């Protein structure tokens, strides 16, 4: 039945490059990133304007943020301005257009002498920098800095004008994903700005951005960003077909899209990673994942997502590996506590009293004396109360929020204990659970853990620890059966891929993470050359000191 | 299809959940038994079970506002009797408002009467009952067990905890507690050629029962229980007491010494007592069967540390004093072991397990002598070799010699 | 192949936790059983390797004809049924004895069956991934329970003597049960075609067997040393009783609950694989395309069988007596595999290439 165990058709790590196929079009769909990169680096501008524009668009996969303004210089020679949308200063671009369309007629004979045209452009444009280039790769690289290229018919060089927009847009740090270390910019509601944020980090034309228009009334633009040659083509095709399948009147947020393109609709678990952080999106794109950006939403979807991604924050990568690993393990512990602790407490206190040390059990018993509810009722009441409190805290205005938490947590908790309505042990358990839950960096996963907690509490009250075990087994089976864009959700844990574990519970040093995740198809396995572990050179400081001492 | 199946599964699970909760107990509905004592009346053959039950309300961690009774004892003792030990245990429930939980029982106490009439009925019950842990300590009480169960240990909250800690302490500090746990007893009973040897707890008669809880530690009251020595069993019946010398001899012979102390006479004047601490003791036994006669060789080696030396002595390497101390220490070890063997022969109970040794090493011979083992045991030659190495002299290298000024 | 390895180790470890015989020489029995078991595994997996793309139902029909082949496969399906039901029952008994004394046993059994059938419904790949996840937990829990036992075990090493005092007879008798429990490996006949490298299945199975034998030896050593040989053969669940004796410190006193949980994980894998194999084999015998519709009815049969086939613990223990369980389980392996090997051999001798028909 063709059931593939493990990751099935994993392509073996290719050390030797595929042989180049010699055909007319140098860029093939099946070319991997490094081949593409080399091809593009070799490409030169063609004298024909249309041909150049064609090549340029091919190289970037007709990404929608590439703007081409065709015009005729002084109504005579066809030319085009090429720039990246929203990176340039519109006034500067208009200035260029005005000069080339109108002012150029002041120079006599420019139509005949190309040298005159060049000097005319250089002298007439009031632009801080004008450079020339004849390479497609370099041209694109400069465009990503906000430069505008002038292409002229019959000329194999482009003039690159500095039209960078230095306006500081109000891109602020995402509130829901705060970091200690790392960039502080976050996505905003504008699709163009969001694409710009990605382009500013990945400055090659191989970052392709495909645009879809979804929603019969809202006409929402949905952009799919990926590295051509890195992302799996089948995966992309699957995603495109899922996007095309959507027939609805309105898409208002990326959450709407998310529900349409999930692999398994009946699951609590988020199958796409939602983030506001451009650095996270870029690192995902660079490892072969795909980002889906939606107009009007600062939340970008990253697909395929695996379970462990929800326990990683981008800080981890910016810290040293031991620190990163430490916080990750803490997060996993936090997740386990936040799911299992109330259930475990109920199971142990109600069923397996022998598991507790005698003194602890006596303490718990003493604290429970006189409490009118059974343990389970106490736990459920406090959990619900806490969830309500938390929800209230989110919705309230910032100024009132802390007041609510003080009233809720301190006054209510303390009063309930004093009145003997709930036992202090339960309050401790609930508080620990809640704090542990906050350690999860991704909201969409944290809320799943909160819901699961109730299920486990109820299972625990039925069968004790064995109920918890049954629940855990069901949960594991469910998690293992999930897929995100065709990729097993629990990878690289199950199927177990040792080479992908370098960036999971523990974080290997960056020079040791030489390969991209195998599970994502691994079109381009190596991301850096191995053996970059830093080491002191032969002439270390000690030698120098030693030398000095000899002299003295 | 898939969704329907999922729905069915969820429904079944919910039904299971709703009908579940068979074993659920809230902890405050439980009476936690901390220690259990078994007694038997010689004449009537009735078993008496005395339990010590924790009273969490009186343990003094409560807020003042909760109104926990400060005058109450933190534990309660309850006694019931029955024709069988389990029956007696079940009869306990007649007198208590909560359900018993035995899982936290750490100490089993047998009274001397019960021990002399056979403890196996109780052991069988303990093994069968799932809540009772067989890893608990076992002692035989020399005195009234009920008094022991009611005794208050000044430093501890509950008597059971006091007893538990006291046993643990004596095991590590003095090695005066022979068989550790119930488990080991089953193990010994199941093995051929070995008898049980259970620790003894001496109950002081004048434990103040009428004295209220608060005042105990303040006055120089006698300790509620003293642990040391042991009860020698044959089969499941106790046949006699062993004194401390014999108990420590057992520990030396079986190599179960964490720390121990020996007292010897000073080699020079032969009157001054000296104390030597014993540690790192190793014991090896080997049966030798030659020319139709059986001999058992026992090699004991130990490290010593000089503890009490009230007179001035030259402790330098040159003097042979250390060597003679070592010889005397080894002799003391030998004496202790011989006293144990003598007791063992006198009571016909092979507590060190020489028979088991032969069963293990010479199984062929064992089948021949198994039936008349105690006849053989009485005449068998047991060659005890002991060796002591004095390693340290405490924090001072040599005595000050203050007594010479007198 | 990883998956196979892990699952089979897990499955093979299960019986370890339930049986220990032959008194102080039980560990010798464990080693002896390795050879018998290796032979049986070779028998089971060897034929599968000859037909890397076919399940036993398919190649049995090829080898001895349609109807006889189906008949033989019914024996195998019966074996799956017995294995899964017995595993479930043993675990449920352990739970009831050890912890949930008042819970009716059918509830525990049916909960286990439900979890197992959900996994079987999700397919082999999901079971494999779940095994990947659970395997480390399982191993860690068993290693931890063994590690805690070591301090006690070393002081009571004398329980292992005398070695082979009663001759080799009891040892051989004691090795029967650990050998025949290898019937669990029958699931290989269904899994092999789904594996990445079916040809290597035999090697992997043997490695798994080696690993599980090592654990078996360690467990029997620990159980015998701690509980004593007589005690070890007397108690109902030796491994559990051993773990119960552990007392390291106040916090690590009662760890048997975790041993039980680990065991539960193992049972889950075993039961779900058996269920998957059973329902798939039955589907193939009946000529159905999809095995999934069969899981529901089969699960009910399974649970009922598990509840009703053993009235009490004594009957369950009887099954693991060498005299009764040995021939019974052995015949479940030997009869079908023997017939198929014979057929294979005859066809081979007759000049045909049976695997290429």
Image: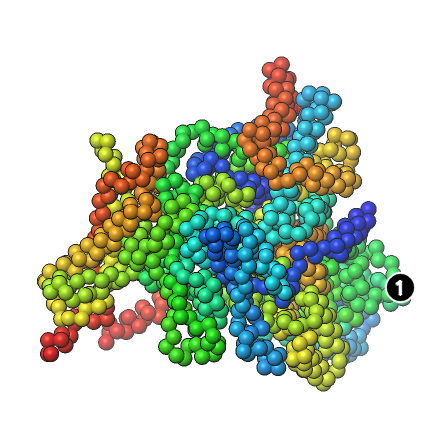
Q: Say which quarter of the image contains residue A9.
A: top right
- Assign the C terminus of chain A to one quadrant of the image: bottom left
Residue C220 x/y as whole percent: 47, 42
Res B291 seen here: yes
What residue do we see at 58% from left, 59% from top? B92
Is the image coloured rainbow, by chain, by secondary structure, or in one colour?
rainbow
Q: Residue furthest front?
A: B43
Note whether C180 is above or below B99 in the view shown.
Answer: above
Residue B193 x/y as whole percent: 36, 41
Residue A267 x/y as whole percent: 75, 57
Res C202 seen here: no
Depth order, front residue of A48/C133: C133
Residue C166 horizontal side relative to residue B63, left or right: left
Depth order, front residue of A292/A423: A423
What residue do we see at 37% from left, 65% from top? B226
Q: Say which quarter of the image contains residue B310.
A: bottom left
Depth order, front residue of A399/B241: B241
What residue do we see at 43% from left, 62% from top? B144
Residue at which label 1 appears: A249
Note whether A129 is above or below A456 in the view shown.
Answer: below
Mark 1, residues whose alpha carbon is within 10 Å: few (<14), some, or many (≥20)? few
- Assign the N terminus of chain A to one quadrant of the image: top right
Residue B217 x/y as whole percent: 42, 77
Note whether A136 is above or below B350 in the view shown.
Answer: below
What residue do we see at 68% from left, 25% from top? C72
User: Could you say whether the residue bearing mark 1 is in a helix, strand or loop?
Assistant: loop
Depth order, front residue of B250/C140: B250
Chain ID for label 1? A
Residue B112 horizontal side relative to residue C299, left or right: left
| Number of numbered discs visible in the structure rendering | 1
């Amino acid at each position: 039945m063709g059931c593939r165990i493990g990751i099935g058709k994993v392509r073996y790590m290719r050390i030797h490059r595929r042989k180049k196929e010699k055909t007319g079009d140098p860029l093939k769909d099946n070319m991997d990133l490094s081949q593409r990169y080399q091809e593009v680096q070799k490409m030169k501008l063609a004298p024909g304007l249309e041909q150049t524009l064609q090549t340029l668009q091919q190289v970037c996969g007709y990404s929608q943020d590439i703007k081409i303004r065709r015009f005729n210089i002084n109504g005579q020679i066809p030319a085009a301005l090429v720039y990246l949308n929203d990176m340039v200063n519109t006034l500067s671009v208009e200035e260029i257009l005005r000069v080339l369309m109108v002012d150029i007629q002041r120079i006599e004979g420019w139509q005949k002498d190309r040298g005159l045209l060049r000097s005319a452009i250089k002298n007439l444009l009031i632009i801080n920098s004008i450079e020339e280039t004849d390479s497609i790769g370099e041209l694109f690289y400069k465009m990503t800095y906000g430069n505008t290229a002038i292409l002229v018919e019959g000329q194999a060089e482009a003039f690159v004008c500095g039209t960078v927009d230095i306006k500081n847009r109000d891109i602020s740090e995402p509130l829901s994903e705060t970091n200690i270390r790392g960039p502080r910019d976050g996505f905003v509601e504008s699709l163009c700005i969001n694409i710009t944020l990605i382009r500013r980090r990945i400055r090659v034309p191989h970052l392709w951005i495909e645009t879809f228009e979804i929603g019969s009334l809202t006409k929402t633009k949905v952009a799919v960003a990926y590295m051509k040659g890195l992302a799996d083509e089948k995966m992309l095709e699957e995603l495109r077909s899922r996007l095309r399948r959507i027939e609805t009147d309105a898409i208002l947020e990326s959450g709407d899209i998310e529900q349409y393109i999930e692999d398994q609709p009946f699951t609590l678990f988020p199958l796409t990673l939602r983030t506001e952080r451009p650095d996270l999106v870029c690192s995902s794109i660079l490892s072969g994942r795909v980002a889906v950006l939606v107009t009007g939403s600062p939340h970008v979807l990253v697909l395929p997502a695996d379970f462990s991604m929800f326990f990683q924050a981008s800080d981890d990568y910016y810290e040293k590996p031991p620190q990163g690993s430490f916080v990750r393990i803490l997060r996993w512990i936090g997740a386990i506590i936040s799911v299992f602790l109330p259930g475990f407490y109920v199971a142990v206190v109600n069923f397996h009293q022998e598991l507790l040390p005698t003194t602890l059990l006596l303490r718990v018993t003493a604290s429970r004396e006189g409490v009118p509810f059974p343990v389970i009722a106490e736990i459920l009441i406090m959990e619900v109360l806490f969830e309500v409190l938390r929800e209230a805290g989110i919705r309230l205005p910032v100024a009132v929020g802390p007041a609510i938490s003080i009233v809720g947590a301190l006054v209510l908790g303390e009063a309930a204990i004093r009145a003997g309505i709930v036992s202090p042990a339960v309050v401790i358990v609930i508080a620990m659970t809640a704090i542990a839950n906050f350690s999860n960096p991704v909201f969409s996963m944290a809320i799943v853990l909160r819901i699961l907690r109730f299920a486990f509490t109820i299972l625990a009250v039925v069968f004790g620890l064995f109920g918890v075990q049954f629940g855990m087994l069901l949960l594991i089976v469910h998690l293992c059966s999930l897929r995100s864009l065709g990729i097993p959700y629990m990878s690289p844990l199950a199927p177990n891929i040792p080479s992908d574990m370098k960036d999971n519970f523990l974080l290997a040093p960056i020079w040791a993470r030489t390969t991209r995740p195998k599970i994502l198809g691994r079109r381009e396995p190596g991301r850096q050359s191995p053996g970059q572990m830093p080491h002191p050179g032969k002439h270390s400081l000690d030698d120098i000191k030693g030398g000095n001492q000899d002299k003295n | 299809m898939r969704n329907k199946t999922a729905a069915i599964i969820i429904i079944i699970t919910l039904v299971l959940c709703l009908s579940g909760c068979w074993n659920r107990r809230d902890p405050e509905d439980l009476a936690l038994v901390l220690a259990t004592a078994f007694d038997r009346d010689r004449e009537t053959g009735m078993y008496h079970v005395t339990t010590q039950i924790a009273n969490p309300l009186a343990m003094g961690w409560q807020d003042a506002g909760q109104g926990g009774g400060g005058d109450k004892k933190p534990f309660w003792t309850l006694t019931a009797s029955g024709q069988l030990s389990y029956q007696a245990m079940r009869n306990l429930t007649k007198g208590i408002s909560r359900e018993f939980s035995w899982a936290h029982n750490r100490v089993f106490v047998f009274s001397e009467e019960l021990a002399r009439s056979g403890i196996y009925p109780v052991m069988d019950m303990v093994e069968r009952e799932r809540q009772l842990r067989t890893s608990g300590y076992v002692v035989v009480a020399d005195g009234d067990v009920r008094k022991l169960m009611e005794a208050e240990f000044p430093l501890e909250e509950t008597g059971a905890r006091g007893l538990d800690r006291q046993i643990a302490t004596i095991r590590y500090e003095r090695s005066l507690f022979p068989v550790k746990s119930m488990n080991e007893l089953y193990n010994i009973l199941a093995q051929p050629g070995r008898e049980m040897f259970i620790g003894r707890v001496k109950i002081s008669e004048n434990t103040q029962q009428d004295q209220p809880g608060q005042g105990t530690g303040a006055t120089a009251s006698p300790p509620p229980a003293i642990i040391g020595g042991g009860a020698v069993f044959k089969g499941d019946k106790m046949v006699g007491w062993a004194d401390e010398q014999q108990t420590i001899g057992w520990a030396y012979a079986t190599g179960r010494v964490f720390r121990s102390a020996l007292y010897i006479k000073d080699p020079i004047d032969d009157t001054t007592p000296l104390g030597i601490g014993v540690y790192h003791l190793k014991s090896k036994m080997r049966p030798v069967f030659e020319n139709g006669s059986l001999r058992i060789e026992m090699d004991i080696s130990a490290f010593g540390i000089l503890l009490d030396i009230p007179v001035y002595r030259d402790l330098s390497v040159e003097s042979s004093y250390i060597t003679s101390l070592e010889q005397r220490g080894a002799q003391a070890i030998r004496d202790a072991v011989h006293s144990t063997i003598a007791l063992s022969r006198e009571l016909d109970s092979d507590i060190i397990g020489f028979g088991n040794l032969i069963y293990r090493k010479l199984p062929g011979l064992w089948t021949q002598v198994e039936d008349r083992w105690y006849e053989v045991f009485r005449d068998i030659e047991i060659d005890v070799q002991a060796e002591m190495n004095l390693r340290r002299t405490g924090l001072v290298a040599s005595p000050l010699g203050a007594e010479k000024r007198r | 192949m990883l998956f196979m390895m892990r699952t089979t180790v897990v499955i093979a470890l299960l019986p370890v936790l339930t049986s220990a015989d032959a008194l102080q020489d039980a560990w010798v029995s464990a080693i002896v059983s390795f050879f018998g078991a290796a032979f049986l595994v070779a028998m089971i997996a060897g034929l599968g390797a000859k037909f890397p793309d076919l399940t036993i139902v398919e190649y049995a029909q090829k080898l001895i004809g349609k109807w006889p082949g189906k008949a033989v496969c019914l024996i195998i399906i019966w074996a799956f049924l017995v294995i899964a039901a017995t595993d479930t029952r043993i675990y449920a008994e352990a739970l009831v004895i050890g912890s949930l004394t008042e819970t009716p046993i059918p509830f525990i059994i049916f909960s286990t069956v439900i979890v197992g059938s959900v996994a079987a419904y999700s397919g082999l790949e999901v079971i494999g991934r779940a095994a990947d996840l659970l395997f480390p937990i399982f191993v860690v829990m068993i290693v931890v329970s063994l590690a805690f036992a070591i301090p006690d075990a070393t002081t009571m090493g004398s329980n292992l003597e005398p070695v082979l005092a009663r001759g080799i007879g009891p040892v051989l008798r004691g090795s029967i049960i650990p050998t025949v429990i290898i019937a669990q490996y029958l699931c290989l006949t269904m899994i092999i075609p789904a594996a990445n490298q079916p040809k290597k299945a035999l090697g992997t199975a043997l490695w798994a067997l080696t690993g599980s034998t090592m654990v078996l030896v360690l467990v029997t050593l620990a159980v015998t040393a701690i509980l004593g040989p007589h005690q070890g053969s007397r108690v109902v669940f030796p491994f559990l009783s051993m773990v119960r004796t552990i007392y390291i410190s106040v916090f690590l006193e009662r760890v048997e609950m975790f041993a039980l949980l680990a065991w539960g994980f193992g049972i889950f894998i075993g039961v779900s694989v058996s269920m998957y194999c059973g329902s798939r084999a039955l589907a193939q015998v009946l000529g159905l395309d999809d095995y999934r519709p069969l899981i529901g009815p089969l699960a009910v049969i399974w649970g009922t069988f598990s509840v009703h086939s053993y009235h009490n613990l004594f009957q369950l223990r009887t099954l693991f007596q060498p005299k009764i369980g040995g021939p019974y389980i052995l015949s479940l392996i030997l009869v079908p595999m023997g017939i198929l090997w014979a057929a294979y051999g005859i066809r081979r001798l007759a000049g045909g290439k049976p695997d290429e028909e």
